Image (spheres, rainbow, N blue to C red):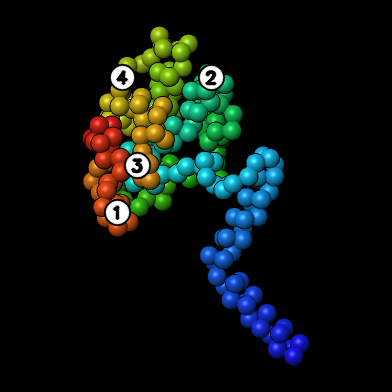
Amino acid sequence: THIEAVEETAEVWRKRLFDISWFMRALNEYIARAANKEDDCTGHFWEGRFKSQALLDESALAACMAYVDLNPVRAKVAKTPETSDHTSIQYRINAARVGKTPKRLMPFVGNSNQAMPQGLPFTLPDYLQLVDITSRYIHPNKRGKVDHSLPIILERLNIEHEQWLTLTTQFETCFKQAAGKVVHLEQYAHNQHQQRVQGRQNARRLLG
């Protein structure tokens, strides 16, 4: 009967609405179709468009943050971090100038001893110093003005200038699924039931 058909259909949709996997598939398909139409292309939307790595420790976090914040400087569309439009560091600098903390960004909580601190485990001044010095290394017109003292964060993380420069210019190619020190990569591979530890050589060379 029509009533039974309606009840069966309602039950199907009820199960789907409780299924987060089904929801994500539907959402991804909608986004993919819209983006492919806009880009005038076909194929898998996520393939080749986005890459991500799990950040397993403070060293990986600092390197990835600086790598992203310095994208405009590396691309030579900005000379300094504060003039790098659409970056979190510009947003933080502008907020700090008026004595505010950006609500949409995770706060800096200093050198926390907690395993899972409620914020970024650095201080804002230390991070700004780190990015400023790094920008002077990678911007061709500012190389003569480099401060060769090791930034405070790098001293704490025990990362040398040469390794840091590689990390902040080649981060995406240095690591695949995850980024961090060797011991953390090994733990990640174990948790993911992977026999091979990807990125071990680069982790040992760059992060110690």
Marks 1, 2: nearer the viewer: 1
Give amino acid for label 2: Lys
Q: Distance between the residues labelled 1 and 2?
A: 39 Å
Residue at image point 59% right, 55% down: 28
Measured from the top left, where is residue 128 in percent x and y?
A: 44, 29
Residue assigned mark 1: 194
Which mark, residue 131?
none
Give amino acid for label 4: Ser
User: 126 or 42: which is nearer to us?
Assistant: 42
Give amino acid for label 3: Ala
Quarter of the image with the N terminus in it: bottom right
Tag 2, which secondary structure?
loop
Q: Which of marks 4 and 1 is nearer the N terminus?
A: 4
Reply above or below: 176 against 117: above
Quarter of the image with the C terminus in it: top left
Q: In this view, does 108 lie to the left or right of 204?
A: right
Residue assigned mark 4: 149
| Mark 3 Cα shell of 10 Å, populated few (<14), some (14-19), many (≥20) | many
Residue assigned mark 2: 76
Residue assigned mark 3: 179
Q: Which of marks 2 and 3 is nearer the N terminus?
A: 2
